[in-house]
Image (cartoon, rainbow, N blue to C red):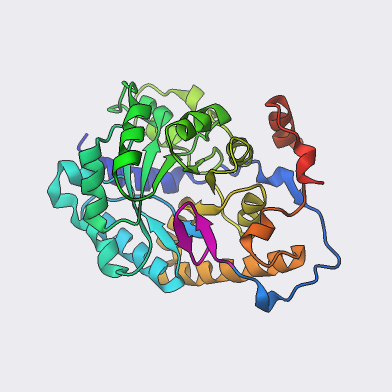
């Protein structure tokens, strides 16, 4: 199938299959603080993710591009939303535009609409250093995501089947690209073993892309004659994946993503140790159903609610929130305990 049509199919099936709502964040409870001791007016949402200094811990995560005028319009409007709310934005995989220059407009539009914003490029783990440089230059990227999506590729009828050398390619890009590199999963989560491998070759920013949101196995199965149903429930839930990644090294900046939608879920992700939170499916659904203006309002509402929740917890900034006390229960507790992580440390 032509790459352009595949990009459009992904949007259609992402909306059709929806969010899984199986992130594990429902297993996280904050310990109530009756004497928070701070004023809402003094709560600060600025965040540092690796070398990136952001006005907000949330950002628009990678969605699309390379699908002609429709994805150009979508990316342009998402860039406007990012501009109007002061948040960062990542584009979808730019390989389509590298292989077909006529698709570059669907990516370049983000810098046109948001000339001063923080923009993040995107390529897959098959990319070369030269392709990474071209993708970064295409949008004047402040950082570059390298997405890893083995399960999606194996389920995709025309997907890759050879994943040899991915870690080596990531290492080369990270050492030579000249901007921060973010390695991102696409909905199946990252284990502590994977994160250790990435950290060992110099990667310092990890986007866990946990299970529980948009399910790319289900999306690709919509496009298959022979269904690979065993991949539909495959992956590490977002909450568990954040904790696994955070426990690898304090030098890592972990981004929580994968089915995160509400301000409370964002706050829980940050309290588990994430330094930033990416949202994609939730924003896409709002935009498609209610339009750009409603999306902009929703992002403003999220910022307001984050400050309210942080005030209730007595946390005046994101570093303080990452030290707040919480209880982990249910399946997430059992998962992490079996993985050798002391959940009680989060409550003490």
Q: Position of residue 4 (x, y in %)?
A: 22, 44
Residue 36's place in the image compared with 235, above or below, is below
Relative height, residue 121 to residue 320 (above, below): above
Which residue is more in the foreground, 172 or 149? Answer: 172
Q: How many marks?
A: 0
Residue 90 visible at all = yes
Q: Quadrant of residue 79?
A: bottom left
**Residue sitting at x 18%, y 44%:** 98
Residue 80: image x %, image y %?
36, 69
Quarter holding the N terminus is: top left
Q: Is residue 48 located in the magenta-colored stretch of the structure? A: yes
Horizontal side, residue 248 vs residue 49: left or right? right
Name the quadrant containing residue 328. Answer: top right
Q: Nearer the viewer, residue 142 or 277?
A: 142
| One can see residue 22 in this view | no
The correct choice, above or below, for 318 with respect to 178 in the image is below
Q: What span is in magenta?
A: 45-57
In percent of width and height, residue 122 lies at 33, 46
Instruction: Tell me what residue is drawn at x 43 percent, y 56 percent.
Output: 284
- The spot of residue 67 in percent (x, y) is 24, 49
**Residue 128 highlighted magenta (yes or no):** no
Name of the residue lying farthest toward the right: 34
């Amino acid at each position: 199938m032509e790459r352009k049509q595949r990009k459009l199919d992904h949007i259609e099936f992402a909306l059709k299959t929806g969010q899984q709502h199986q992130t594990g964040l429902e297993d996280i409870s904050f310990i109530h603080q009756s004497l928070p001791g701070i004023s809402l007016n003094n709560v600060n949402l600025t965040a540092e993710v690796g070398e990136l200094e952001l006005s907000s811990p949330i950002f628009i995560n990678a969605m699309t591009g390379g699908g002609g005028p429709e994805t150009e319009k979508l990316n342009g409007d998402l860039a406007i939303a990012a501009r109007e709310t002061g948040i960062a934005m990542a584009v979808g995989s730019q390989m389509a535009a590298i292989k077909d220059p006529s698709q570059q407009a669907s990516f370049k539009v983000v810098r046109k609409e948001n000339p001063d914003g923080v923009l993040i490029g995107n390529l897959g783990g098959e990319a070369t250093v030269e392709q990474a440089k071209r993708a970064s230059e295409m949008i004047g990227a402040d950082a570059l995501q390298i997405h890893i999506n083995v399960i999606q590729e194996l389920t995709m009828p025309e997907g890759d089947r050879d994943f040899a050398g991915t870690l080596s390619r990531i290492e080369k890009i990270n050492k030579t690209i000249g901007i921060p590199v973010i390695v991102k999963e696409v909905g199946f989560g990252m284990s502590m073993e994977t994160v250790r491998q990435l950290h060992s070759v110099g990667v310092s920013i990890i986007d866990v892309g946990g299970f529980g949101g948009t399910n790319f196995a289900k999306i690709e199965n919509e496009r298959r004659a022979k269904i690979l149903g065993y991949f539909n429930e495959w992956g590490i839930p977002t909450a568990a994946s954040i904790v696994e990644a955070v426990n690898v090294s304090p030098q890592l900046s972990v981004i929580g993503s994968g089915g995160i939608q509400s301000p409370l879920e964002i706050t829980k992700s940050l309290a588990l140790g994430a330094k930033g939170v990416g949202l994609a499916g939730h924003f896409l659904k709002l935009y498609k159903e209610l339009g750009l203006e409603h999306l902009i309002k929703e992002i403003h509402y999220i910022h307001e609610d984050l400050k309210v929740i942080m005030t209730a917890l007595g946390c005046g900034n994101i570093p303080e929130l990452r030290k707040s006390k919480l209880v982990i229960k249910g399946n997430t507790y059992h998962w992490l305990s079996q993985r050798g992580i002391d959940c009680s440390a989060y409550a003490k």
